[in-house]
Image (cartoon, rainbow, N blue to C red):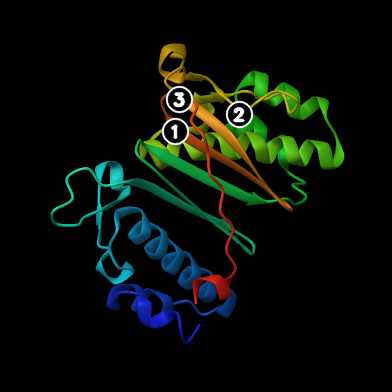
Amino acid sequence: MEELLPRLSAEEQQRAARFRISEARHRFILARVMLRHQLGKEIGIVPESVFFATGKHGKPRLDIPGIEDPSQFNLSHSGDVVVFVVGSVDVGVDVESLRDVPNAERMARRFFSPSEQSVIQSLGGATRYHAFLRIWTQKEAFLKATGLGVGMPLREVETEPDPAAPPGLRAIAGDKNEAANWTLLEVEIPDAVCTVALRGPAAELEVQRFTPVDLT
């Protein structure tokens, strides 16, 4: 961590220092270093020259002089996993550690559509937990891609709830045409559930894996 910390901006280093739990601080440092490393590589500049600003709906964006059409990106983390997605269109990603969700049915009644609730109620045990997290990451990936976040209730983002079917959006606030403008892709990560959302038709997703040593 001592090697990686100087690669962050002064503001990011201050944010890192505010974490009282070392694991959370390390995760933040690794996430920001990975973000700078990959965005710099994508654009062709050194990571230290990567600057950020706040875009529409508060979503972070690149702010680099001389680059008119910067890459779109998004970041998510859960447990020991940090996931970052970059593309030429609006993109979002959400990852959740695979775990028990004892209150899955209660949360589904609050945040899921009737069809999604039905699937959760029909399943049990680990299968229910996995299905719940899969639906959850589909919703969050879309909201993060748009930057809407808490601006749209999760219930209004209707997803494909069948665990055996490919991920997808069925309707956005009841609008099936808007849902058809988006593609959801599932990324296989050990002991985690991860969904990427992108505006437009299905695209090839290149997956790269890093450890802290790779980033040093």
Q: Specify whether 68 is left or right of 154.
A: left
Q: Give the amino acid at mark 3.
A: Trp
Q: Residue at x 36, y 53 (%)?
A: 42
Q: Farthest residue toward the front?
A: 44
Instruction: Measuring from the top left, give residue 67's x and y in whole percent.
Output: 18, 50
Marks 3/2: CA distance?
19 Å
For label 1, the crowd category at 10 Å Cα-Cα, with few meaning under 14, some 14 to 19 and many 20 or more, is many
The mark closer to the camera, 1 or 2, is: 1
Q: Residue at x 43, y 14 (%)?
A: 175
Asked if residue 165 is positioned above or below residue 110 in the image, the reply reads: above
Q: Are marks 1 and 3 in contact (CB under 8 Å)?
A: yes
Q: Quadrant of residue 208?
A: bottom right
In 3D space, how far apart are the residues under numbered discs 1 and 2 (Cα atoms)? 21 Å
Residue under the point 60% across and 23% down? 113
Task: Residue under label 3, please give it.
Answer: 182
Q: CA distance from mark 1 to mark 3?
A: 6 Å
Query: Element under label 2?
Result: loop
Q: Which residue is mark 2?
A: 112
Q: Position of residue 9 (x, y in %)?
A: 30, 74
Answer with mark 1 or mark 3, whichever residue precedes in sequence.
Answer: 3
- The residue tagged with tag 1: helix, strand or loop? strand
The residue identified by callout 1 is 198
